[in-house]
Image (cartoon, grey):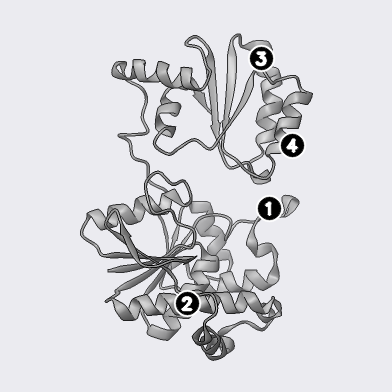
């Protein structure tokens, strides 16, 4: 059995939040592994798709304060300069994971992201001596100082990421480049394994003749005609993804390609700026912001597109 530490993970295939983690835990459950997911939400235990979900029992918990006092020596000094509520929350989360482990027989801890989940997992591991695996995904390891991207830009969190990685028994990196960065942080490369994110090729595949009617239906749903050249981009509207360059590029594309449209799927903090840029460049007819697209619909929208831009 495995305890998965993944704070905001969705509890069904339809939910987008941390969907890459849900796919993993679902497949593990399908293979007969008992999976317990502990989320950082106030909620009672429930089962969804064969996965046991647990949450935080209550916000104010004296035992979490006791655990913090016990763990204080495990904190690097610079990390103690943060707000006390951050320290309390980490130990509250750890406390509720420990409760699940005491209630069930757990063999392995698996935390997604080095912070906060990985560091909280390290606090739990120090208490119960179970093997800890941490999967690194990006924001927890990579940094882009120009736009303030990456939690490691703050020294008090950088040290917690390093502490979590140091205490882990194994680390999964979703790319070779990320493994290199993890190794540069002083982590033994022998315990870092590269496992790229998986893709279900039954869902994400080129269209066949049998898909034509479905593709036309999807195009109509999104206001795209049968003969339009459809470009699709699906990303969180975050500065790190440089989506503004795609919109600038569309100004050139419309001069060279007739009957073309860009669909921009996803939401995020720079939506307003991107809409403003689209209007400024006179691209309202060619660039369509459609918001969040349900996971069940995304493979169909991809098949209905002429070109996907990442």
Q: Residue furthest right?
A: 280
- For marks 2 and 1, give the CA distance: 30 Å
- Residue at 37%, 41% (x, y): give it: 199
Sequence-earlier tag: 2 or 1: 2
Front-lying residue, 39 or 238: 39
Sequence-earlier tag: 2 or 4: 2
Q: Secondary structure at mark 2?
A: helix
Q: Which residue matches tag 3? A: 254
Residue 94: mark:
2
- Residue at 43%, 47% (x, y): give it: 15
Q: Which residue matches tag 4? A: 273
Q: In x, y percent, where is residue 268? A: 63, 43
Residue 144: mark:
1
Sequence-earlier tag: 1 or 4: 1
Q: Compared with residue 38, is residue 285 higher up or lower down, i.e. above or below?
A: above
Q: Compared with residue 150, is residue 163 higher up or lower down, i.e. above or below?
A: below
Q: In x, y percent, where is residue 89? A: 57, 75
Q: In x, y percent, where is residue 295? A: 43, 39
Front-lying residue, 108 or 193: 108
């Amino acid at each position: 059995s495995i305890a998965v530490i993944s704070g905001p993970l969705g509890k069904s295939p339809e939910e987008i939040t941390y969907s890459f983690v849900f796919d993993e835990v679902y497949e593990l459950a399908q293979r007969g592994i008992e999976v317990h997911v502990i989320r950082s939400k106030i909620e009672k235990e429930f089962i969804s798709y064969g996965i046991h979900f647990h949450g935080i029992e209550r916000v104010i918990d004296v035992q979490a304060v006791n655990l913090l006092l016990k763990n204080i020596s495990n904190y690097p000094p610079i990390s103690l300069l943060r707000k006390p509520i951050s320290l309390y929350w980490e130990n509250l989360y750890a406390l509720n994971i420990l409760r699940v482990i005491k209630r069930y027989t757990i063999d392995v801890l698996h935390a997604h992201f080095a912070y906060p989940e990985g560091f909280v997992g390290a606090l739990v591991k120090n208490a119960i001596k179970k093997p800890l695996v941490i999967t690194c995904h990006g924001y927890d390891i990579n940094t882009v100082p120009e736009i303030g991207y990456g939690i490691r830009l703050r020294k008090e969190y950088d040290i917690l990421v390093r502490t979590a990685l140091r205490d882990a028994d194994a680390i999964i990196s979703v790319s070779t480049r990320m493994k290199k960065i993890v190794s540069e942080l002083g982590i033994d490369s022998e315990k870092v394994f590269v496992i790229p994110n998986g893709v279900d090729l039954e869902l994400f595949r080129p269209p066949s003749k049998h898909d034509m009617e479905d593709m036309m239906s999807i195009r109509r749903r999104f206001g795209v005609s049968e003969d339009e050249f459809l470009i699709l981009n699906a990303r969180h509207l975050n500065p790190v993804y440089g989506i503004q360059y795609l919109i600038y590029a569309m100004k050139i594309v419309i001069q060279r390609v007739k009957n073309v449209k860009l669909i921009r799927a996803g939401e995020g903090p720079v939506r307003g700026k991107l809409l403003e840029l689209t209007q400024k460049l006179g691209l309202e007819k060619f660039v369509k912001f459609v918001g969040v697209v349900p996971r069940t619909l995304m493979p169909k929208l991809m098949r209905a597109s002429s070109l996907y831009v990442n």
